[in-house]
Image: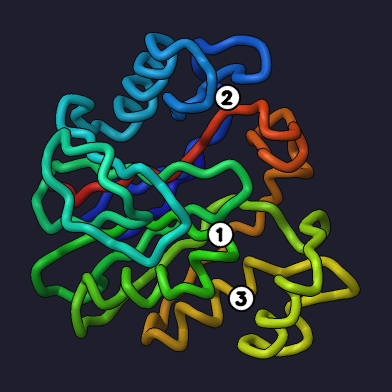
Amino acid sequence: MIRWHLDGYEVVFTTRVGGVSEGPYASLNLGRKSGDDVERVDENRRIACESIGADLEKLALNYQVHSDRVLRAAPRVRGEQADGLWTDEPGLPILALSADCLPIALARADRGEPAVAVLHVGWRGLLAGIVEAGARALGDRELAAAIGPGIGPCCYDVGEEVAAPFRERFGDDVVHESRLDLWTSAERTLRAAGVERVKRFDRCTACEPETFFSHRRDAGRTGRQGVIAYVAG
């Protein structure tokens, strides 16, 4: 587990380590639609929630579709097509899944009413505006963000149909030869949306097979890690 330490919140980026799944899903796979045994996935979710004192019975998550939709979470509500969730309800855990795309956590960092959001951010969602939607959901406040593990510029080969709009929007330096720097593109988007405090972990999911699932490295037969967050009571 990789913790983001922010007063008033519990936030953890999970790894593939410490669960009960086997084979290509070993071991802390959080994705029920990955092909893994769902009972094992549910146990993995319990383990992950327990690691930060979250209530599994309240856990909320989306059916992720690479969109710009960010929804207000409700306890145990799952399956809505969206790629972000936010909440200001203390003790309500929210989860975004990933396996190369970026898991991003956003939180109000001032002394007002706390609220937190989690986002699933791939290249499509980033261009579509998922990060800006997450920032808007938390309102015109002082915000902090953390960019969790995702495929890095060392490994993320893309075609020109992806590279061109990223160069145009974020600058030539986010594409080196055919490799996309999704980390830097996400950070620049966060800062343009008014997020002044941005924490980057810069851990490449494709480079660390013992630590992370990677959809690209494993040709689609793999598990899901993610980010779990809640407002501390």
Instruction: Check contact, mark 3 vs mark 1: CB within 8 A.
Output: no
The numbered mark, 2 or 1, whose residue comes first in the sequence reads: 2
Nearer to the camera, 13 or 57: 57
Discs 3/1, front: 1
Q: Secondary structure at mark 1?
A: loop
Q: Alpha carbon of mark 2 to alpha carbon of mark 3: how far? A: 28 Å
Q: Amino acid at mark 1?
A: Gly
Rendered image: mark on residue 17: 2
Look at the numbered discs 2 and 3 and tell me whether their residues touch, using CB distance below 8 Å: no
Q: Is residue 178 above or below residue 10?
A: below
> Mark 1 and mark 2 in contact (Cβ < 8 Å)?
no
Q: CA distance from mark 2 to mark 1?
A: 23 Å
Please identify the quarter of the rendering in which residue 202 is found.
bottom right
Is tag 2's residue or tag 3's residue first in the polypeptide sequence? Answer: 2
Residue at image position (53%, 75%) is 127
Asked where in the image residue 92 lies, by quadrant, the reply is top left
Q: Quadrant of residue 76?
A: top left
Rendered location of residue 114, percent (x, y): 15, 64
Q: How far is the residue under mark 3 from the one under mark 1?
A: 11 Å
Say above or below: 12 vs 129. above
In the depicted structure, whether residue 182 falls above or below residue 77 = below
Residue at 74%, 38% in the rendered image = 208
Place of residue 30 in the rendered image (x, y in percent of width and height, measured from the top left): 45, 28
Q: Residue beneath label 3, please?
A: 185
Residue 131, position as x, y percentages in the image? 41, 71
**Number of marks drawn:** 3
Q: Image check: 27 left or right of 69?
A: right
Instruction: Name the secondary structure under disc 2.
Output: loop
The residue positioned 47% from the left and 44% from the top of the image is: 13
Q: Does residue 195 lie above or below 181 as drawn?
A: below
Mark 1 is surrounded, within 10 Å at the Cα level, by few (under 14), some (14 to 19) or many (20 or more) other residues, namely many
Q: Which residue is mark 1?
A: 122
